Image (spheres, rainbow, N blue to C red):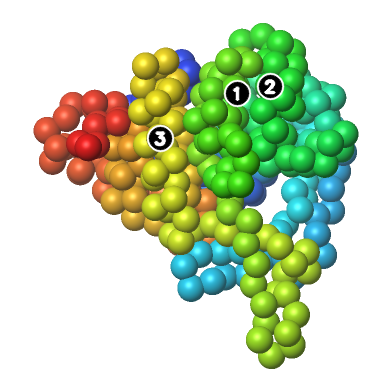
Amino acid sequence: MPPSTRLTTSLAGIPLSNPIVLAAGTAGLIDEMSDVADLSRIGAIVTKSITKEPRPGNPYPRITFTRAGMLNAIGLANPGIDDFVADIAPRVASVPTALIGSIAGDSIEDYVACAKAMEAVEGIGLVELNVSCPNVHSGLEFGADPVALAELVSAVSSSLNDTKLFIKLSPITVGTPNTIVDLARVAIDAGGHGITLTNTVPAMGIDVHTKKPILSNTIGGLSGPAIHPIVVRLVHLVYAQLAKDANIPIMAAGGVTRWQDAAEFILAGASAIQIGAGSFADPRAALKVTKGLDKWVSRMGSTNVSELVGAVIV
């Protein structure tokens, strides 16, 4: 059966066959999920977050499951940008879907170097900045400091030619003077083409028998169904107060395990939906969500999923 055109979409001009995307760090470096899922039926894959230098990541244990999601403190384990370009990039042309390069770093110079290297890889037309990393100069996360965020996005944007740039923000702004909309606006004004909402929520688990933290790093990132309603709200806020009028695409990430979760994100204002922890629970979750979304769009009487973006009635 030919793929349905009801789900075709685009992100800042990058065409996708459907809006379902495998999130960074959950699908291997690029195509490891091909053993369990037909990647041609997935809208896009985000690479593992790549840094300038190789990183071994945090000691084990660095991942655990909770009643409503997953805690992880992987520590950005990756081979580094040079090895990625030499050993992984040659496989990009054989991947039967769009690829989004995820990059991270401790300094602006690191991000720029990784972004330029990603742009040079044929087949990667969009780069996602993971800005939930501490700036070595200030100690604050890039994504929590508007000045540092603007400097970072501006530097990366000006270093690229045609590659589109999405900024992946943290969901936690409580206790700071900046809202998620403020930070999204800063990222777009500095040269970003779209926003990814969101990264994981800082969290912690304790082994009640040993009285020690479950994760070796003590603190990890919570993902999965527990954070889904939080992210729905953030997507709605950014769409309603910024993205709708400015025609800025949003990728939503957080707790999608069913097509209904993805549909919520679309109604809140997302043009694409990333699946991360859900793929650990069910490696074929993305395919099931895509099938369910297609039927939903048809039932809603729409010819294309884009007609439902931001269509929540409030």
Left or right: 238 as drawn, with respect to 202: left
Q: Which residue type does callout 3 highlight?
A: Leu
> Which residue bears the numbered disc 3?
237
Q: Earlier in the sequence, mark 2 or mark 1?
A: 2
Q: Is label 2 in contact with label 1 (beta carbons under 8 Å)?
A: yes
CA separation, marks 2 and 1? 6 Å
Q: Is residue 7 above or below residue 14?
A: below
Q: Earlier in the sequence, mark 3 or mark 1?
A: 1
CA separation, marks 2 and 3? 20 Å
Which residue is drawn at the image coordinates 30% and 31% (left, top)?
310
> Which residue bears the numbered disc 2?
150
Q: Which residue type does callout 1 highlight?
A: Ala
CA separation, marks 3 and 1? 15 Å
Which residue is drawn at the image coordinates 52% and 51% (left, top)?
276
Category of crowding for the residue at label 3, using alpha-carbon neighbours closer than 10 angstroms: few (below 14), some (14–19), many (at least 20)? some
Under circle 1, the secondary element is helix
Residue 285 appears anywhere in the view: no
